[in-house]
Amino acid sequence: MTDVSDARRELSDGKRRIIEQLKRVDGATAPTLAEHFGLTDTAVRQHLEALELAGLVERIATAPAGRGRPPVTWRLTTLAAELFPDRHADLTVEVLNAVRQRLGDDALDAVLAARGAQQVATYRTLVGPASEGLPVRVRRLADQRTAEGYLADVLPDGDALVLVEHHCPIAGAAHSCGNLCASELETFRTVLGRDVRVERTQHLLNGDARCAYRITAARSATPA
């Protein structure tokens, strides 16, 4: 399947118009699309088959009205959603700035604290109790962070583990509000417990290529 960024670059005007029309109508047959654009059925099907190969559209067989082959309806896949503008990151930054401007820093801190409390509750359930061992618990935390878009790995480092996050899906918001990062570090410390030491060793906001956290059991941690 083609990467969506590659597919976006390779879209011809005809394919792009078909995608936009399918977005408007939630699905259509090739003859319906051909009539709408004034094209032949063959031309439209060629576009649809190319888009299907790229993973951007899919076909659904519907019950025939009478005898004969059932008509095929084409619709967009979830992957195609990435071809349309998405301002959720901008919206997050705007909301954070609005809270700060209208309600003050204390209100913003309270919002972040509430978010942190929700994260702690979720992560504690997923990570499990200390009795299950630190490597297992950190691996579960990394899996959850990956599911949230952080592309996390766990690497050994002597008597420590390093949780590396290769991507930050909230980078724009974090640049606007540094307390988001402080909140996440405190969340890791709270979830893993007082017997575990968590230090941030790389930080995107400091110019590093990624964020990384060195995690050690308290008994093997050296004094700060």
Image: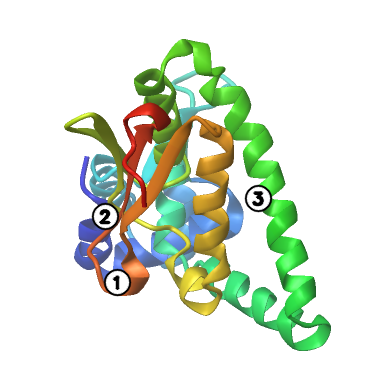
Position above or below: 45 against 142: below
User: Which residue is farthest bottom?
Assistant: 101
User: In this rendering, would 214 be left or right of 6?
Assistant: right
* Location of mark 3 (residue): 116
- Secondary structure, mark 2, is helix
- Name the residue at 38% across, 27% down: 219
The CA span between labels 1 and 3 is 45 Å
Tell which of 164 and 94 is nearer to you: 164
Residue density around tag 3, few if under 14, some if 14–19, many if 20 or more, within 10 Å: many
What residue is pinned by disc 2? 43
In the image, taking residue 68 as reference, residue 4 lies left or right, namely left
**Mark 2: amino acid:** Ala
135 vs 118, left or right, is left
Q: How is the image coloured?
A: rainbow
> Mark 3 or 2, which is nearer the eye?
3
- For the residue pair 193 and 105, the one nearer the viewer reads as 193
Residue 27 visible? The answer is yes
Q: Is residue 148 placed above or below 104 in the rendered structure? A: above
State how far apart marks 2 and 1 are (Cα). 13 Å
Q: Which residue is mark 1?
A: 13
Asked if 176 appears above or below 216 in the picture, the reply is below
> Going by the image, does 93 lie left or right of 118?
left
Q: Are marks 3 and 2 in contact (CB under 8 Å)?
A: no
Of badges 1 and 3, the one in the foreground is 3
In this view of the protein, which residue sits in the foreground, 158 or 165? 158
Earlier sequence position, callout 1 versus callout 3: 1
* Circle nearer the N terminus (2, 1): 1
Amino acid type, residue under disc 1 in the picture: Asp
Quarter of the image containing the N terminus?
Answer: top left
